[in-house]
Image: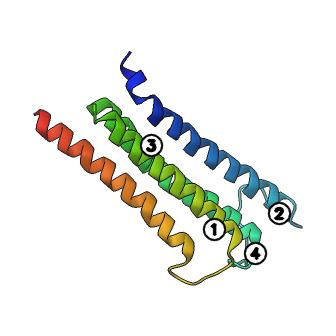
Amino acid sequence: MFLTDYRATLIWMAVIIATVLVQWFVASGTKARQAGAIPGKEPQQMSHQDFVFRAWRTHQNSLENLSPMLGTVVLAILADVDPLWTASATAVFAVARIAHMVLYYAIATEKNPSPRSYFFMLGLLANIALLVMVLVTLFNGA
């Protein structure tokens, strides 16, 4: 079957989705324990010094990054980009997002760039690299 070639990619995508779900539970759970918390409303008057804010921003940032990567992975599979390269880029993205999450949870800083910024960029570069592979594959096949 065609998708068996992309098994590793699909596993890494499952890791990415599981990571976002964990972030959702952490963000929702910490916010819900706050006095006067309103479901669906972002934490008010908080900064990076507050774990509730950092948990919420971690989840929001992952959501912002998930759509482009998910789309790129689907394109890579449909375009038949080399499965090893597809899995490798997806793995780099997954590990970078996990490192970003851990650092965002652990370090309360408003400094830019912060240590988490480097992992954000690594994930972004993995997404861009995979998209370039998609485009090269599509144009070479034309």
| Residue 31, image quadrant | bottom right
Nearer the camera: disc 4 or disc 1: 1
Nearer the camera: disc 1 or disc 3: 1
Sequence order check: which comes first, mark 1 or mark 3?
A: 3
Q: Position of residue 86 (x, y in %)?
A: 36, 40
Q: CA distance from mark 3 to mark 2?
A: 31 Å
Sequence order check: which comes first, mark 1 or mark 2?
A: 2
Q: Are marks 4 and 1 in contact (CB under 8 Å)?
A: no
Mark 1, residues whose alpha carbon is within 10 Å: few (<14), some, or many (≥20)? Answer: some
Helix, strand or loop status at disc 3 = helix
Q: Which mark is residue 50?
A: 4
Q: Are marks 1 and 2 in contact (CB under 8 Å)?
A: no
Residue at image location 36% in from the left, 20% down from the top:
2
Q: Nearer the viewer, residue 88 or 33?
A: 88
Q: CA distance from mark 4 to mark 2?
A: 14 Å
Asked whether, in this view, residue 58 is left or right of residue 79, the answer is right
